Image (cartoon, grey):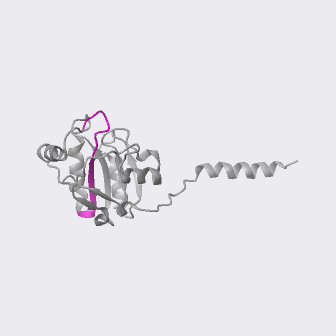
Amino acid sequence: MYSSNYFIIILTILMFSFFNKVDAKYEKIFFDHTIKNINNEVIDLNQYKGKTILLVNVASKCGFTKQYTGLQELFEKYRDKGFYVIGVPSNQFGGQEPGSNAEIKDFCETNFNITFPLTDKVDVKGDNAHEIYKWAKKNYGTSTVPKWNFHKILINKEGKIEDTFNSFVTPMSGKIINKIESVL
């Protein structure tokens, strides 16, 4: 039979193997991708290399739409330190972003004075999700898949996912600010 020490060793190894977080094996980083901007021009995300990015799926007719104000404040507060917000309009949650790119751009500029980059309206979940969101899920897991509008993904200077924040976490919350300041 086996000794009790053998079982303790095996049990210990198994216990600690569940607590180890395995780092993703990034084949690509965030900066290796492209996406169209709100004016339908291709954005090479390599232009943000070495910057910290908060990627946020946005919508104009959502209960969280007022978060645009906080996103703009956050962008203005940390832009000089290499921080960018990138808003990604999506109509996948309650049909709350039904407008065209031109209507979305006008809404954001008129109502919230948005100056951070906005992308083309795209899917952020499911089979038709934009490649950035598929990349995020593959490399960081399901916490990157938006459950609703104004879900946030923080990308560090190395182009890897640092953290995610659900829609209820406001842009100017201590949780987001502390995380941004720790990676800037």
Q: Quadrant of the C terminus?
A: bottom left
Q: Position of residue 147 (x, y in %)?
A: 38, 39
Furthest residue toward left: 110
Number of numbered discs overlaid on the protein picture: 0
State the image coordinates of residue 27 (x, y, percent, origin top left).
46, 62
Check the image and name the residue furthest to the right.
Answer: 1
Q: Is residue 81 magenta?
A: yes
Q: Is residue 145 left or right of residue 171?
A: right
Locate residue 163, reporting x and y percent: 41, 51
Q: Position of residue 11 (x, y in %)?
A: 72, 48
Q: Residue at x 34, y 55 (%)?
A: 180
Which region of the structure is painted magenta?
80-96
Q: Residue at x 38, y 62 (%)?
A: 159
Residue in the foreground of this view, choosing between 126 and 87: 126
Indicate yes or no whether the magenta region holds residue 32. Answer: no
- Residue at 40% x, 42% y is 126
The quarter of the picture where residue 50 lies is bottom left
Residue closest to the eye, 101 or 49 = 101
Q: Considering only vertical position in the picture, is 64 above or below 176?
A: above
Q: Residue at x 29, y 56 (%)?
A: 35
Horizontally, is 104 left or right of 162 in the view?
left
